[in-house]
Image (cartoon, helix red, strand yellow):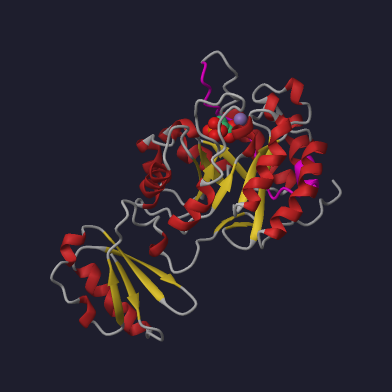
Amino acid sequence: MIIVTRAGITSEELDHIRERVEALGLRTHISRGEHRTVIGCIGDEQLLLGVPLLAIPGVEEVLPVLKPYKLAAKEFSALPSRVRVGEAVFGDTGFVVIAGPCSVEGEPMTLETALAVRERGATVFRAGAYKPRTSPYSYRGMGEAGLEVLSRVRAQSGLPVVTEILDPRQVEQVAEHADMLQIGTRNMQNFALLTEVGRVHRPVLLKRGMAATVTDLLLAAEYIMSQGNMQVVLCERGIRTFEVATRNTFDVAAIPVLKRETHLPVIADPSHAAGRREYVPALAFAAAAAGADGIIVEVHPRPEEALSDGEQSLTPDEFGDMMGRLDGFVRAAGRRMEAVAPVEAA
Ligand code: PEP
Ligand code: MN
């Protein structure tokens, strides 16, 4: 249930409405817009039945949220949500570019890639220490040692880090080293993991499951948010269809659909959607044109030596070239590229 308050409501009136709702056994979430403040009521809505909420001073309207997701629903927030990771802000007018290798393969290549993508305009660094691989015989990451590499690279490059988490028992450990926790496609419906990342104060990058509908994705976000963590960024990364010309089928339409359905920021992953590096720029441009808040792209200094996802990794120069061309699409969509201060001399 959403309570829309009157324009110019006083803070005493607002507190009084919250107290009334909380006394009935629900939690409240305040969201302030330019003209209105909206109070989201979280919990069993049956408890509100028969209560004359409209009679409470300051209440203008009481609206049920008819969607299966509530906290993630557009109506729940008076304004689009912003999620800050280091200097980068998702969900504002900036377009955030996250870039880096698929996996941490060692310290020198990780640092080399971070500095290379930073120099070319990325504001968040990506690299997996724990890799979910379809085959158990593929490279599965450096694990804890990889997290330590990420900590040092983060300090040396100045870029905040996003890295994947595979197991609810890793949450605290990964949160110690990373600025943002990634839940990958294969774990989008790992409900124990979603619940656990919902309990920490760290932004979460939630990737769409390869066979998940938009509603499934939003309900996965709801799992995280219902535990109290509202800092969720959604990511379209391609879905599995009958088409095999690309690794996945990039569902570009999911971007405007999500933008309509939720207040959460939405980014896209052209690398895992394409599977081949020559297609990555076109999909990145399409994401920007469709209204995404950013992209996450795989970049490797020597893709042919990559231990995972080399075929879809851009070289730093290809990434730089893509960034130059991306700017026009970002501007046409009414945004600007996020920028970082130039790299200081080491
Ligand atoms: C990744 O980001 O490297 C990854 C494994 O992505 P996804 O979960 O989208 O397959
Ligand atoms: Mn990858």
Q: Which residues are magenta?
A: 115-135
Query: Which quadrant of the figure has residue 338?
Result: bottom right
Vertical side of 151 occupied by 266: above or below: below
Q: In terms of depth relative to the viewer, which is nearer, 83 or 263?
A: 263
| Residue 230: percent from left, percent from top | 44, 55
* 237 sits left or right of 306 in the view: left
* 110 sits left or right of 237 in the view: right
| Residue 149: percent from left, percent from top | 66, 34
Whether residue 204 appears in this view of the structure is no
Location of the N terminus (image quadrant) = bottom left
Image quadrant, ligand 1: top right
Q: Is residue 234 magenta?
A: no
| Residue 169: percent from left, percent from top | 42, 33
Residue drawn at x 52%, y 16% as measured from the top left: 135
Vertical side of 6 occupied by 87: above or below: above
Q: What is the magenta segment's predominant secondary structure? A: loop
Residue drawn at x 16%, y 63% as measured from the top left: 47
- In this view, the residue farthest toward the top is 137
Q: In terms of depth relative to the viewer, which is nearer, 195 or 317?
A: 317
Q: How many marks?
A: 0
Vertical side of 13 occupied by 345: above or below: above
* 30 sits left or right of 16 in the view: right
Whether residue 88 appears in this view of the structure is yes
Residue drawn at x 76%, y 21% as measured from the top left: 304
- In this view, the residue farthest toward the right is 345
Q: In terms of depth relative to the viewer, which is nearer, 116 or 344?
A: 116
Residue drawn at x 53%, y 44% as measured from the top left: 235
Q: Is residue 134 magenta?
A: yes
| Residue 59: percent from left, percent from top | 29, 80
Query: Which quadrant of the figure has residue 268?
Result: top right
